[in-house]
Amino acid sequence: ILKFIVITIFSYLSIVQLLAFVIFGAYLTADSSANAIMKANGISNPWWWALFYTISSFQNAGFALFGASIVPFSSN
C-alpha cells in the first residue's frame, strides 16, 4: 500500500505542475496583452516565466520575477 501512495503522490505533483506550466505558457504566448507585459518587464521567453511561477507557487516558495509579483496580470 505504501508503494501505491508514493506513486499516487508523485503522479499528482507531476501532473498538476505540468498541466499548470502548459496552461500558463500557452496563455502567455497566445495573448498579446500578457505578452506585452512580459516584454515590458524584460522577460523575452514566456515559457521560462511559466516554468518559474509554476514551480515557485506550487512549492509555496513565494519567489517572483516581477517586483509587483503577478499584479500586472490582474486585468487579464
Image: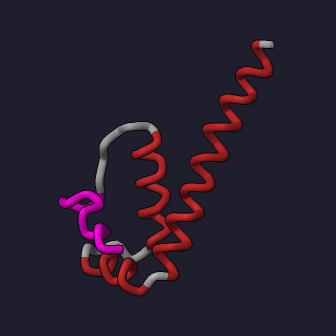
- Pinpoint residue 47: horizontal percent, then vertical percent: 50, 68
- Pinpoint residue 37: horizontal percent, then vertical percent: 30, 77
Residue range (magenta)? 65-76
Magenta region includes residue 35: no
Magenta stretch, main secondary structure, is: loop
- Pinpoint residue 58: horizontal percent, then vertical percent: 46, 42
- Pinpoint residue 23: horizontal percent, then vertical percent: 56, 64
> Number of marks in the image?
0
Look at 47% across and 47% down and name the residue there: 55
Q: Which residue lies furthest to the left in this view?
A: 67
Q: Is residue 15 left or right of residue 64?
A: right
- Depicted 76 relative to depicted 14: above or below: below
Q: Which residue lies furthest to the top in this view?
A: 1
- Depicted 30 relative to depicted 8: above or below: below
Q: Is residue 19 left or right of residue 11?
A: left
Split into 4 quadrants, where in the image is the N terminus?
Answer: top right
Q: Which residue lies furthest to the front in this view?
A: 75
Look at 30% across and 47% down and name the residue there: 63
Look at 44% across and 37% down and name the residue there: 59
Colour setup of the view: secondary structure
Split into 4 quadrants, where in the image is the C terminus?
Answer: bottom left
Q: Is residue 36 left or right of residue 68?
A: right
Name the foreground residue: 70 vs 66: 70
- Depicted 6 relative to depicted 34: above or below: above
- Depicted 33 relative to depicted 69: above or below: below
